[in-house]
Image (cartoon, grey):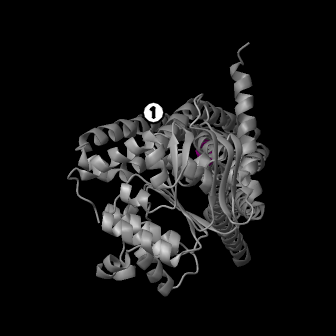
Amino acid sequence: MLPTEQERSRTRLRRYVSFIRSLVRLHPRYFTIAVAGAFLFALCTVASSIAVQWVIDNVVLPRFDLDDGIDVTVSTVATGCAAILVIGVLRIAGVITRRTYAGITQWRVAESLSSQVIDRLVDQPPSWHQHQSDGQLLARAGVDVDTSVSVMAPIPFATSTILMVVVAGGYLIYTDVVMGLVAVAVFPILMVLNVVYEQRVAVHFDDAQQALGEFTGAVHESFEAVQLVKAYGAQDRETERLSVMAGRVRDARIKAVTIRGTFEAVLDTLPSLTNIGLVLLGAYRVDSGDVTVGELGGFIFMFTLLVFPLRLIGYALSELPHSYTGFRRVRSTADDPLEHDPERSIGHTPEHVAVRFDAVGFTFPGEAQPVIADASVTISDGTVTAFVGPTGSGKSTLVDLIAGLLAPTSGVVSLGAGPRTVVLQEAFLFSGTVRDNVVVADDITDDEVWEALRLASADQFVRDLPDGLDTVVGERGVTLSGGQRQRVALARALARRPRLLLLDDTTSALDPATEQAVLNHLRRELADTTVVMVASRPSTISLADDVVYVDGGRIAAHGTHDELMGSVSAYRELVEAFEADRAAPTGGVA
Protein backbone atom coordinates (compact mmCIF):
# COMPACT_ATOMS: atom_id res chain seq x y z
CA MET A 1 0.00 0.00 0.00
CA LEU A 2 1.35 3.42 -0.98
CA PRO A 3 1.95 5.85 1.90
CA THR A 4 -0.57 8.68 2.30
CA GLU A 5 0.40 12.32 2.00
CA GLN A 6 0.15 12.66 5.79
CA GLU A 7 2.52 9.73 6.30
CA ARG A 8 4.95 11.19 3.77
CA SER A 9 4.81 14.53 5.59
CA ARG A 10 5.56 12.87 8.93
CA THR A 11 8.45 10.95 7.39
CA ARG A 12 9.83 14.12 5.85
CA LEU A 13 9.50 15.95 9.18
CA ARG A 14 11.41 13.20 11.00
CA ARG A 15 14.15 13.37 8.39
CA TYR A 16 14.43 17.13 8.73
CA VAL A 17 14.57 16.96 12.52
CA SER A 18 17.27 14.30 12.32
CA PHE A 19 19.13 16.41 9.74
CA ILE A 20 19.11 19.54 11.92
CA ARG A 21 20.14 17.50 14.96
CA SER A 22 23.08 16.08 13.01
CA LEU A 23 24.29 19.56 12.08
CA VAL A 24 23.84 21.00 15.59
CA ARG A 25 25.73 18.10 17.18
CA LEU A 26 28.85 19.15 15.30
CA HIS A 27 29.11 22.47 17.19
CA PRO A 28 26.38 22.63 19.88
CA ARG A 29 27.99 25.35 22.00
CA TYR A 30 28.01 27.99 19.25
CA PHE A 31 24.48 27.06 18.21
CA THR A 32 23.24 27.33 21.81
CA ILE A 33 24.72 30.83 22.14
CA ALA A 34 23.07 31.84 18.85
CA VAL A 35 19.69 30.55 20.06
CA ALA A 36 20.14 32.31 23.42
CA GLY A 37 20.77 35.59 21.59
CA ALA A 38 17.68 34.98 19.47
CA PHE A 39 15.59 34.26 22.57
CA LEU A 40 16.79 37.50 24.15
CA PHE A 41 15.74 39.37 21.01
CA ALA A 42 12.34 37.63 21.03
CA LEU A 43 11.60 38.50 24.66
CA CYS A 44 12.77 42.08 24.16
CA THR A 45 10.51 42.39 21.12
CA VAL A 46 7.51 41.55 23.30
CA ALA A 47 8.83 43.85 26.03
CA SER A 48 9.21 46.72 23.54
CA SER A 49 5.51 46.51 22.70
CA ILE A 50 4.66 46.66 26.39
CA ALA A 51 6.98 49.67 26.78
CA VAL A 52 5.34 51.43 23.81
CA GLN A 53 1.91 50.83 25.35
CA TRP A 54 3.09 52.23 28.72
CA VAL A 55 4.68 55.32 27.13
CA ILE A 56 1.54 56.08 25.09
CA ASP A 57 -0.77 55.74 28.10
CA ASN A 58 1.47 57.45 30.68
CA VAL A 59 3.50 59.98 28.69
CA VAL A 60 1.93 60.77 25.32
CA LEU A 61 -1.82 60.82 26.03
CA PRO A 62 -1.56 62.78 29.32
CA ARG A 63 0.14 65.57 27.37
CA PHE A 64 -3.06 65.91 25.33
CA ASP A 65 -5.22 65.90 28.47
CA LEU A 66 -3.69 68.85 30.36
CA ASP A 67 -7.15 70.32 30.78
CA ASP A 68 -7.93 67.40 33.09
CA GLY A 69 -5.17 68.55 35.40
CA ILE A 70 -2.93 65.60 34.71
CA ASP A 71 0.75 66.48 34.53
CA VAL A 72 3.60 64.28 33.33
CA THR A 73 6.52 64.28 35.71
CA VAL A 74 10.14 64.21 34.63
CA SER A 75 10.59 60.89 36.37
CA THR A 76 7.76 59.37 34.30
CA VAL A 77 9.33 60.56 31.05
CA ALA A 78 12.73 59.35 32.21
CA THR A 79 11.30 55.97 33.14
CA GLY A 80 9.70 55.60 29.70
CA CYS A 81 12.86 56.68 27.91
CA ALA A 82 15.02 54.40 30.06
CA ALA A 83 12.74 51.42 29.45
CA ILE A 84 12.79 51.93 25.67
CA LEU A 85 16.55 52.52 25.69
CA VAL A 86 17.37 49.47 27.84
CA ILE A 87 15.07 47.21 25.83
CA GLY A 88 16.57 48.57 22.59
CA VAL A 89 20.11 47.91 23.78
CA LEU A 90 19.18 44.38 24.83
CA ARG A 91 17.54 43.77 21.45
CA ILE A 92 20.71 44.97 19.72
CA ALA A 93 22.79 42.66 21.91
CA GLY A 94 20.45 39.78 21.04
CA VAL A 95 20.69 40.52 17.31
CA ILE A 96 24.49 40.78 17.37
CA THR A 97 24.83 37.59 19.40
CA ARG A 98 22.41 35.68 17.19
CA ARG A 99 23.92 36.78 13.90
CA THR A 100 27.52 36.39 15.01
CA TYR A 101 27.18 32.93 16.50
CA ALA A 102 24.75 31.73 13.84
CA GLY A 103 27.40 32.63 11.26
CA ILE A 104 30.14 30.98 13.32
CA THR A 105 27.97 27.87 13.68
CA GLN A 106 27.21 27.76 9.97
CA TRP A 107 30.81 27.93 8.80
CA ARG A 108 32.19 25.75 11.59
CA VAL A 109 29.66 23.09 10.55
CA ALA A 110 30.71 23.59 6.92
CA GLU A 111 34.33 23.13 7.95
CA SER A 112 33.51 19.93 9.82
CA LEU A 113 31.47 18.49 6.95
CA SER A 114 34.19 19.36 4.43
CA SER A 115 36.80 17.73 6.65
CA GLN A 116 34.69 14.57 6.96
CA VAL A 117 34.30 14.34 3.18
CA ILE A 118 37.97 15.03 2.49
CA ASP A 119 39.10 12.58 5.18
CA ARG A 120 36.92 9.89 3.62
CA LEU A 121 38.27 10.68 0.15
CA VAL A 122 41.82 10.38 1.49
CA ASP A 123 41.04 7.15 3.35
CA GLN A 124 39.45 5.47 0.35
CA PRO A 125 41.97 3.39 -1.63
CA PRO A 126 42.87 4.24 -5.24
CA SER A 127 40.66 1.40 -6.47
CA TRP A 128 37.60 3.26 -5.07
CA HIS A 129 38.56 6.49 -6.80
CA GLN A 130 38.92 4.71 -10.13
CA HIS A 131 35.15 4.26 -10.42
CA GLN A 132 34.20 7.72 -9.09
CA SER A 133 33.65 11.00 -10.92
CA ASP A 134 36.26 13.57 -9.85
CA GLY A 135 33.83 16.39 -10.54
CA GLN A 136 31.12 14.84 -8.39
CA LEU A 137 33.56 14.30 -5.52
CA LEU A 138 34.67 17.92 -5.85
CA ALA A 139 31.02 19.00 -5.68
CA ARG A 140 30.45 16.96 -2.50
CA ALA A 141 33.29 18.73 -0.67
CA GLY A 142 32.38 22.19 -1.98
CA VAL A 143 29.00 23.11 -3.44
CA ASP A 144 27.05 20.44 -1.55
CA VAL A 145 28.63 21.34 1.80
CA ASP A 146 27.75 25.02 1.30
CA THR A 147 24.20 24.02 0.44
CA SER A 148 23.95 21.76 3.50
CA VAL A 149 24.73 24.55 5.96
CA SER A 150 22.63 27.31 4.34
CA VAL A 151 19.79 26.47 6.73
CA MET A 152 21.92 27.00 9.83
CA ALA A 153 21.83 30.81 9.76
CA PRO A 154 18.02 31.27 9.96
CA ILE A 155 17.35 28.38 12.36
CA PRO A 156 18.22 30.21 15.64
CA PHE A 157 15.96 33.13 14.67
CA ALA A 158 13.20 30.77 13.49
CA THR A 159 13.48 28.88 16.79
CA SER A 160 13.18 32.06 18.82
CA THR A 161 10.22 33.12 16.69
CA ILE A 162 8.27 30.17 18.04
CA LEU A 163 8.92 31.46 21.55
CA MET A 164 8.02 34.96 20.44
CA VAL A 165 4.73 33.81 18.90
CA VAL A 166 3.76 31.91 22.06
CA VAL A 167 4.59 34.80 24.41
CA ALA A 168 3.19 37.46 22.08
CA GLY A 169 0.01 35.43 21.43
CA GLY A 170 -0.62 35.20 25.15
CA TYR A 171 0.05 38.92 25.56
CA LEU A 172 -2.25 39.87 22.68
CA ILE A 173 -5.13 37.77 24.05
CA TYR A 174 -4.49 39.16 27.53
CA THR A 175 -4.61 42.70 26.15
CA ASP A 176 -7.90 42.14 24.33
CA VAL A 177 -9.52 38.77 23.76
CA VAL A 178 -11.36 39.76 20.58
CA MET A 179 -8.42 41.38 18.77
CA GLY A 180 -6.04 38.82 20.24
CA LEU A 181 -7.98 35.90 18.79
CA VAL A 182 -8.12 37.62 15.37
CA ALA A 183 -4.37 38.22 15.40
CA VAL A 184 -3.47 34.78 16.73
CA ALA A 185 -5.74 33.11 14.15
CA VAL A 186 -3.44 34.43 11.43
CA PHE A 187 -0.40 32.57 12.85
CA PRO A 188 -1.53 29.01 12.03
CA ILE A 189 -2.61 30.16 8.55
CA LEU A 190 0.88 31.48 7.94
CA MET A 191 2.40 28.25 9.27
CA VAL A 192 0.17 26.15 6.99
CA LEU A 193 1.25 28.27 4.04
CA ASN A 194 4.88 27.58 4.97
CA VAL A 195 4.29 23.83 5.16
CA VAL A 196 2.45 23.76 1.81
CA TYR A 197 5.25 25.78 0.26
CA GLU A 198 7.92 23.44 1.64
CA GLN A 199 6.14 20.40 0.24
CA ARG A 200 5.74 21.91 -3.22
CA VAL A 201 9.26 23.31 -3.49
CA ALA A 202 11.18 20.30 -2.11
CA VAL A 203 11.16 18.27 -5.33
CA HIS A 204 12.45 21.22 -7.36
CA PHE A 205 15.32 21.80 -4.95
CA ASP A 206 16.19 18.09 -5.18
CA ASP A 207 16.26 18.33 -8.97
CA ALA A 208 18.27 21.56 -8.90
CA GLN A 209 20.92 20.21 -6.53
CA GLN A 210 21.29 16.96 -8.49
CA ALA A 211 21.57 18.89 -11.75
CA LEU A 212 24.11 21.26 -10.18
CA GLY A 213 26.28 18.34 -9.04
CA GLU A 214 26.19 16.82 -12.52
CA PHE A 215 26.97 20.18 -14.10
CA THR A 216 29.91 20.77 -11.73
CA GLY A 217 31.33 17.34 -12.59
CA ALA A 218 30.94 17.94 -16.33
CA VAL A 219 32.66 21.35 -16.13
CA HIS A 220 35.55 19.84 -14.17
CA GLU A 221 35.89 17.05 -16.73
CA SER A 222 35.72 19.48 -19.65
CA PHE A 223 38.38 21.76 -18.18
CA GLU A 224 40.67 18.80 -17.58
CA ALA A 225 40.31 17.77 -21.23
CA VAL A 226 40.64 21.31 -22.62
CA GLN A 227 43.59 20.39 -24.86
CA LEU A 228 41.76 17.38 -26.27
CA VAL A 229 38.61 19.43 -26.84
CA LYS A 230 40.54 22.08 -28.75
CA ALA A 231 42.61 19.54 -30.68
CA TYR A 232 39.47 17.89 -32.03
CA GLY A 233 37.60 21.15 -32.56
CA ALA A 234 34.90 20.02 -30.13
CA GLN A 235 34.36 23.41 -28.48
CA ASP A 236 30.88 23.81 -29.91
CA ARG A 237 29.87 20.30 -28.87
CA GLU A 238 31.16 20.84 -25.32
CA THR A 239 29.48 24.24 -25.15
CA GLU A 240 26.19 22.69 -26.21
CA ARG A 241 26.56 19.80 -23.74
CA LEU A 242 27.31 22.11 -20.82
CA SER A 243 24.55 24.51 -21.91
CA VAL A 244 21.98 21.71 -21.77
CA MET A 245 23.17 20.72 -18.27
CA ALA A 246 23.19 24.34 -17.10
CA GLY A 247 19.67 24.65 -18.51
CA ARG A 248 18.50 21.83 -16.24
CA VAL A 249 19.88 23.70 -13.21
CA ARG A 250 18.23 26.91 -14.40
CA ASP A 251 14.82 25.31 -15.07
CA ALA A 252 14.71 23.56 -11.68
CA ARG A 253 15.70 26.74 -9.85
CA ILE A 254 13.24 28.88 -11.80
CA LYS A 255 10.43 26.55 -10.75
CA ALA A 256 11.56 26.74 -7.12
CA VAL A 257 11.94 30.54 -7.24
CA THR A 258 8.52 30.92 -8.91
CA ILE A 259 6.91 29.01 -6.04
CA ARG A 260 8.89 31.09 -3.54
CA GLY A 261 7.77 34.33 -5.20
CA THR A 262 4.12 33.30 -5.02
CA PHE A 263 4.52 32.21 -1.42
CA GLU A 264 6.21 35.45 -0.36
CA ALA A 265 3.55 37.56 -2.08
CA VAL A 266 0.86 35.80 -0.06
CA LEU A 267 2.95 36.10 3.10
CA ASP A 268 3.25 39.86 2.53
CA THR A 269 -0.40 40.40 1.70
CA LEU A 270 -2.07 38.42 4.47
CA PRO A 271 -0.42 40.25 7.46
CA SER A 272 -1.01 43.64 5.79
CA LEU A 273 -4.71 42.93 5.35
CA THR A 274 -4.85 41.64 8.93
CA ASN A 275 -3.19 44.84 10.16
CA ILE A 276 -5.80 46.97 8.42
CA GLY A 277 -8.54 44.86 9.98
CA LEU A 278 -6.95 45.16 13.43
CA VAL A 279 -6.76 48.96 13.16
CA LEU A 280 -10.45 49.17 12.25
CA LEU A 281 -11.43 46.69 14.95
CA GLY A 282 -9.13 48.41 17.44
CA ALA A 283 -10.71 51.81 16.76
CA TYR A 284 -14.08 50.30 17.57
CA ARG A 285 -12.72 48.68 20.76
CA VAL A 286 -11.13 51.98 21.90
CA ASP A 287 -14.36 53.82 21.26
CA SER A 288 -16.23 51.26 23.34
CA GLY A 289 -13.70 51.63 26.15
CA ASP A 290 -12.56 48.00 26.02
CA VAL A 291 -8.94 48.97 25.30
CA THR A 292 -6.89 52.11 25.70
CA VAL A 293 -5.12 53.95 22.90
CA GLY A 294 -1.82 52.78 24.36
CA GLU A 295 -2.96 49.16 24.37
CA LEU A 296 -4.06 49.48 20.72
CA GLY A 297 -0.73 51.08 19.79
CA GLY A 298 1.24 48.37 21.54
CA PHE A 299 -1.03 45.73 20.01
CA ILE A 300 -0.50 46.93 16.42
CA PHE A 301 3.21 47.45 17.08
CA MET A 302 3.51 43.89 18.41
CA PHE A 303 1.68 42.35 15.45
CA THR A 304 3.81 44.33 12.98
CA LEU A 305 6.99 43.20 14.68
CA LEU A 306 5.90 39.55 14.41
CA VAL A 307 5.44 39.61 10.63
CA PHE A 308 9.13 39.59 9.74
CA PRO A 309 10.09 36.83 12.22
CA LEU A 310 7.25 34.71 10.82
CA ARG A 311 8.76 35.19 7.38
CA LEU A 312 12.02 33.91 8.83
CA ILE A 313 10.24 30.67 9.68
CA GLY A 314 9.17 30.49 6.06
CA TYR A 315 12.70 31.18 4.92
CA ALA A 316 14.07 28.46 7.18
CA LEU A 317 11.46 26.00 5.91
CA SER A 318 12.26 26.95 2.32
CA GLU A 319 15.95 26.29 2.91
CA LEU A 320 15.28 22.93 4.59
CA PRO A 321 14.67 20.85 1.44
CA HIS A 322 17.51 22.60 -0.35
CA SER A 323 19.95 22.00 2.50
CA TYR A 324 18.72 18.48 3.15
CA THR A 325 19.36 17.55 -0.49
CA GLY A 326 22.93 18.84 -0.25
CA PHE A 327 23.41 17.06 3.09
CA ARG A 328 22.30 13.72 1.66
CA ARG A 329 24.84 14.06 -1.14
CA VAL A 330 27.56 14.95 1.37
CA ARG A 331 26.72 11.99 3.61
CA SER A 332 26.60 9.63 0.63
CA THR A 333 30.33 10.23 0.27
CA ALA A 334 31.32 10.78 3.92
CA ASP A 335 29.46 7.62 5.02
CA ASP A 336 30.42 5.46 2.06
CA PRO A 337 32.03 2.33 3.56
CA LEU A 338 35.77 2.14 3.13
CA GLU A 339 36.73 -0.27 0.42
CA HIS A 340 39.36 -2.88 1.11
CA ASP A 341 42.77 -1.27 0.66
CA PRO A 342 44.77 -3.34 -1.86
CA GLU A 343 47.88 -2.43 0.13
CA ARG A 344 46.76 -4.79 2.89
CA SER A 345 46.73 -7.73 0.48
CA ILE A 346 50.46 -7.48 -0.20
CA GLY A 347 52.62 -10.17 1.38
CA HIS A 348 56.35 -10.14 2.25
CA THR A 349 59.06 -11.86 0.25
CA PRO A 350 62.18 -13.57 1.57
CA GLU A 351 65.55 -11.82 1.37
CA HIS A 352 66.94 -10.97 -2.10
CA VAL A 353 63.48 -11.23 -3.69
CA ALA A 354 61.87 -7.93 -4.74
CA VAL A 355 58.58 -9.16 -6.23
CA ARG A 356 56.82 -12.49 -6.27
CA PHE A 357 53.52 -13.50 -7.83
CA ASP A 358 51.98 -16.74 -6.55
CA ALA A 359 49.12 -17.92 -8.81
CA VAL A 360 47.79 -14.36 -9.02
CA GLY A 361 44.53 -13.64 -10.77
CA PHE A 362 42.57 -10.43 -11.19
CA THR A 363 39.11 -9.72 -12.56
CA PHE A 364 37.55 -6.28 -12.63
CA PRO A 365 34.28 -6.03 -10.63
CA GLY A 366 31.29 -6.93 -12.75
CA GLU A 367 33.41 -8.62 -15.41
CA ALA A 368 33.48 -12.35 -16.12
CA GLN A 369 36.74 -12.51 -18.08
CA PRO A 370 39.88 -12.25 -15.90
CA VAL A 371 42.52 -9.69 -16.88
CA ILE A 372 45.26 -11.68 -15.13
CA ALA A 373 45.06 -15.47 -14.73
CA ASP A 374 47.31 -17.75 -12.66
CA ALA A 375 50.38 -15.47 -12.86
CA SER A 376 53.47 -16.77 -11.06
CA VAL A 377 56.88 -15.11 -11.34
CA THR A 378 59.80 -14.06 -9.10
CA ILE A 379 61.89 -10.91 -9.58
CA SER A 380 65.22 -10.58 -7.78
CA ASP A 381 66.53 -7.54 -5.93
CA GLY A 382 68.52 -4.97 -7.88
CA THR A 383 67.42 -6.15 -11.33
CA VAL A 384 65.74 -4.41 -14.24
CA THR A 385 62.73 -6.39 -15.42
CA ALA A 386 60.61 -5.56 -18.45
CA PHE A 387 56.96 -6.58 -18.86
CA VAL A 388 56.43 -7.07 -22.60
CA GLY A 389 53.27 -8.09 -24.42
CA PRO A 390 50.69 -7.04 -26.97
CA THR A 391 48.16 -4.28 -26.24
CA GLY A 392 45.59 -5.36 -23.66
CA SER A 393 47.62 -8.33 -22.45
CA GLY A 394 47.57 -7.17 -18.78
CA LYS A 395 51.01 -5.55 -18.39
CA SER A 396 49.73 -2.37 -16.73
CA THR A 397 47.45 -4.41 -14.48
CA LEU A 398 50.48 -6.35 -13.24
CA VAL A 399 52.18 -3.05 -12.39
CA ASP A 400 49.04 -1.82 -10.59
CA LEU A 401 48.98 -5.03 -8.53
CA ILE A 402 52.61 -4.50 -7.50
CA ALA A 403 51.94 -0.82 -6.74
CA GLY A 404 49.06 -1.73 -4.43
CA LEU A 405 46.56 0.11 -6.60
CA LEU A 406 44.62 -3.11 -7.19
CA ALA A 407 44.13 -6.18 -5.01
CA PRO A 408 44.34 -9.64 -6.60
CA THR A 409 41.09 -11.58 -6.72
CA SER A 410 43.12 -14.77 -6.24
CA GLY A 411 46.68 -15.63 -5.28
CA VAL A 412 49.20 -13.47 -3.45
CA VAL A 413 51.47 -10.58 -4.49
CA SER A 414 54.52 -10.31 -2.20
CA LEU A 415 57.10 -7.51 -2.08
CA GLY A 416 60.44 -6.95 -0.39
CA ALA A 417 61.05 -4.38 2.32
CA GLY A 418 61.68 -0.73 1.54
CA PRO A 419 59.85 2.14 -0.15
CA ARG A 420 58.41 1.82 -3.63
CA THR A 421 57.33 4.45 -6.12
CA VAL A 422 55.38 4.28 -9.34
CA VAL A 423 55.38 6.44 -12.45
CA LEU A 424 52.21 5.82 -14.38
CA GLN A 425 51.78 5.86 -18.13
CA GLU A 426 50.04 9.23 -18.02
CA ALA A 427 52.40 11.50 -16.11
CA PHE A 428 50.36 13.70 -13.77
CA LEU A 429 51.76 17.08 -12.74
CA PHE A 430 50.21 19.58 -10.36
CA SER A 431 49.69 23.18 -11.44
CA GLY A 432 52.47 24.50 -9.17
CA THR A 433 56.19 24.84 -9.78
CA VAL A 434 58.71 22.24 -10.90
CA ARG A 435 59.99 22.10 -7.32
CA ASP A 436 56.46 21.52 -5.96
CA ASN A 437 55.96 18.62 -8.35
CA VAL A 438 59.19 16.89 -7.34
CA VAL A 439 58.96 17.55 -3.60
CA VAL A 440 55.17 16.96 -3.12
CA ALA A 441 55.23 18.09 0.54
CA ASP A 442 58.17 15.83 1.55
CA ASP A 443 61.28 17.21 3.23
CA ILE A 444 63.50 17.21 0.15
CA THR A 445 66.23 19.82 -0.36
CA ASP A 446 66.92 21.66 -3.60
CA ASP A 447 70.17 19.72 -4.01
CA GLU A 448 68.21 16.46 -3.81
CA VAL A 449 65.67 17.85 -6.28
CA TRP A 450 68.43 18.68 -8.77
CA GLU A 451 69.99 15.24 -8.28
CA ALA A 452 66.66 13.55 -9.01
CA LEU A 453 66.21 15.73 -12.09
CA ARG A 454 69.70 14.77 -13.27
CA LEU A 455 68.96 11.06 -12.89
CA ALA A 456 65.81 11.59 -14.93
CA SER A 457 67.78 13.58 -17.56
CA ALA A 458 65.55 16.55 -16.79
CA ASP A 459 68.03 18.92 -15.15
CA GLN A 460 69.14 20.65 -18.35
CA PHE A 461 65.69 21.60 -19.65
CA VAL A 462 64.63 22.73 -16.14
CA ARG A 463 67.68 25.04 -15.98
CA ASP A 464 66.58 26.50 -19.31
CA LEU A 465 63.08 27.28 -18.04
CA PRO A 466 62.41 30.98 -17.27
CA ASP A 467 62.45 30.52 -13.47
CA GLY A 468 64.19 27.16 -13.14
CA LEU A 469 62.72 25.17 -10.26
CA ASP A 470 60.27 28.01 -9.58
CA THR A 471 58.70 27.82 -13.04
CA VAL A 472 54.95 27.24 -12.83
CA VAL A 473 54.05 24.33 -15.11
CA GLY A 474 50.29 24.99 -15.32
CA GLU A 475 47.30 22.67 -14.92
CA ARG A 476 48.53 19.07 -15.39
CA GLY A 477 51.87 20.45 -16.61
CA VAL A 478 50.29 21.93 -19.72
CA THR A 479 53.27 24.21 -20.44
CA LEU A 480 55.65 21.23 -20.76
CA SER A 481 55.97 18.71 -23.56
CA GLY A 482 55.00 15.07 -23.05
CA GLY A 483 58.61 13.98 -22.62
CA GLN A 484 59.31 16.79 -20.15
CA ARG A 485 56.29 15.85 -18.07
CA GLN A 486 57.40 12.22 -17.99
CA ARG A 487 60.89 13.15 -16.83
CA VAL A 488 59.61 15.47 -14.05
CA ALA A 489 57.28 12.69 -12.90
CA LEU A 490 60.20 10.24 -12.97
CA ALA A 491 62.33 12.69 -10.95
CA ARG A 492 59.54 12.86 -8.37
CA ALA A 493 59.79 9.09 -7.94
CA LEU A 494 63.60 9.02 -7.90
CA ALA A 495 63.85 11.81 -5.29
CA ARG A 496 62.56 9.31 -2.73
CA ARG A 497 65.35 6.79 -3.45
CA PRO A 498 62.97 3.83 -3.74
CA ARG A 499 63.93 0.19 -3.30
CA LEU A 500 61.35 -0.69 -5.97
CA LEU A 501 60.68 1.57 -8.96
CA LEU A 502 57.67 0.83 -11.16
CA LEU A 503 57.54 2.37 -14.62
CA ASP A 504 54.35 1.92 -16.65
CA ASP A 505 55.65 2.74 -20.15
CA THR A 506 57.06 5.86 -18.53
CA THR A 507 59.71 6.61 -21.16
CA SER A 508 57.40 6.20 -24.17
CA ALA A 509 57.48 9.94 -24.95
CA LEU A 510 61.29 10.16 -24.82
CA ASP A 511 63.61 9.88 -27.77
CA PRO A 512 65.80 6.71 -27.72
CA ALA A 513 68.98 8.56 -26.68
CA THR A 514 67.29 10.26 -23.69
CA GLU A 515 65.60 7.02 -22.72
CA GLN A 516 68.90 5.15 -22.75
CA ALA A 517 70.56 7.92 -20.70
CA VAL A 518 67.81 7.65 -18.08
CA LEU A 519 68.12 3.86 -17.83
CA ASN A 520 71.91 4.08 -17.64
CA HIS A 521 71.60 6.51 -14.73
CA LEU A 522 69.29 4.09 -12.96
CA ARG A 523 71.69 1.16 -13.47
CA ARG A 524 74.82 3.04 -12.47
CA GLU A 525 73.66 5.18 -9.57
CA LEU A 526 70.68 3.27 -8.19
CA ALA A 527 72.18 -0.20 -8.31
CA ASP A 528 70.21 -1.35 -5.26
CA THR A 529 66.89 -0.28 -6.77
CA THR A 530 64.77 -2.91 -8.46
CA VAL A 531 63.17 -1.58 -11.62
CA VAL A 532 60.02 -3.12 -13.07
CA MET A 533 58.89 -1.47 -16.29
CA VAL A 534 56.33 -1.91 -19.00
CA ALA A 535 58.28 -1.61 -22.25
CA SER A 536 57.40 -1.59 -25.93
CA ARG A 537 60.61 -0.20 -27.41
CA PRO A 538 63.17 -2.84 -28.47
CA SER A 539 66.08 -0.72 -27.29
CA THR A 540 64.50 -0.51 -23.85
CA ILE A 541 63.68 -4.21 -23.71
CA SER A 542 67.24 -5.17 -24.58
CA LEU A 543 68.55 -3.20 -21.58
CA ALA A 544 66.54 -5.28 -19.12
CA ASP A 545 68.09 -8.13 -17.11
CA ASP A 546 64.88 -10.14 -17.35
CA VAL A 547 61.84 -10.04 -19.59
CA VAL A 548 58.40 -11.25 -18.54
CA TYR A 549 56.35 -11.97 -21.65
CA VAL A 550 52.63 -11.46 -21.00
CA ASP A 551 49.98 -12.71 -23.40
CA GLY A 552 46.23 -12.87 -22.80
CA GLY A 553 46.58 -12.15 -19.09
CA ARG A 554 49.03 -15.01 -18.55
CA ILE A 555 52.77 -15.05 -18.09
CA ALA A 556 53.70 -16.94 -21.23
CA ALA A 557 57.50 -16.84 -20.77
CA HIS A 558 60.22 -15.44 -18.49
CA GLY A 559 63.91 -15.05 -19.29
CA THR A 560 66.45 -12.75 -20.89
CA HIS A 561 65.64 -10.89 -24.07
CA ASP A 562 68.03 -13.04 -26.11
CA GLU A 563 66.62 -16.26 -24.67
CA LEU A 564 63.06 -15.32 -25.50
CA MET A 565 63.99 -14.12 -28.98
CA GLY A 566 65.42 -17.56 -29.67
CA SER A 567 62.83 -19.75 -27.98
CA VAL A 568 59.45 -17.97 -28.09
CA SER A 569 58.21 -17.28 -31.61
CA ALA A 570 55.28 -15.11 -30.49
CA TYR A 571 57.67 -12.92 -28.50
CA ARG A 572 60.06 -12.66 -31.44
CA GLU A 573 57.25 -11.66 -33.80
CA LEU A 574 56.02 -9.03 -31.35
CA VAL A 575 59.49 -7.44 -30.94
CA GLU A 576 60.00 -7.46 -34.68
CA ALA A 577 56.66 -5.70 -35.05
CA PHE A 578 57.85 -3.13 -32.49
CA GLU A 579 61.02 -2.60 -34.52
CA ALA A 580 59.00 -2.15 -37.71
CA ASP A 581 56.82 0.46 -35.98
CA ARG A 582 59.89 2.29 -34.67
CA ALA A 583 61.41 2.35 -38.15
CA ALA A 584 58.46 4.41 -39.40
CA PRO A 585 59.17 8.19 -39.46
CA THR A 586 57.23 9.24 -36.35
CA GLY A 587 59.69 11.56 -34.58
CA GLY A 588 60.27 11.46 -30.80
CA VAL A 589 59.16 14.07 -28.29
CA ALA A 590 61.81 15.41 -25.97
| Residue 363 falls inside the magenta stretch | no
Q: Secondary structure at mark 1?
A: helix
Q: Is residue 10 left or right of residue 196?
A: right
Q: What amino acid type should be assigned to the residue bearing mark 1?
A: Lys
Q: Is residue 586 left or right of residue 439?
A: left
Q: Position of residue 502 (x, y in %)?
A: 54, 60
Q: Position of residue 399 (x, y in %)?
A: 55, 52
Q: What span is colored magenta in the figure?
A: 312-317
Magenta stretch: dominant secondary structure: helix
Q: Is residue 418 left or right of residue 138?
A: right
Which is nearer the eye, 389 or 219?
Answer: 389
Q: Position of residue 378 (x, y in %)?
A: 64, 54
Q: Quadrant of the N terminus?
A: top right
Q: Which residue is mark 1?
A: 255
Task: Specify few, some or many for label 1: CA neighbours under 10 Å numbering under 14, 14-19, or 20 or more.
Answer: some
Q: Is residue 479 visible?
A: no
Q: Position of residue 468 (x, y in %)?
A: 35, 81
Q: Quadrant of the C terminus?
A: bottom left
Q: Is residue 187 visible?
A: yes
| Residue 315 falls inside the magenta stretch | yes
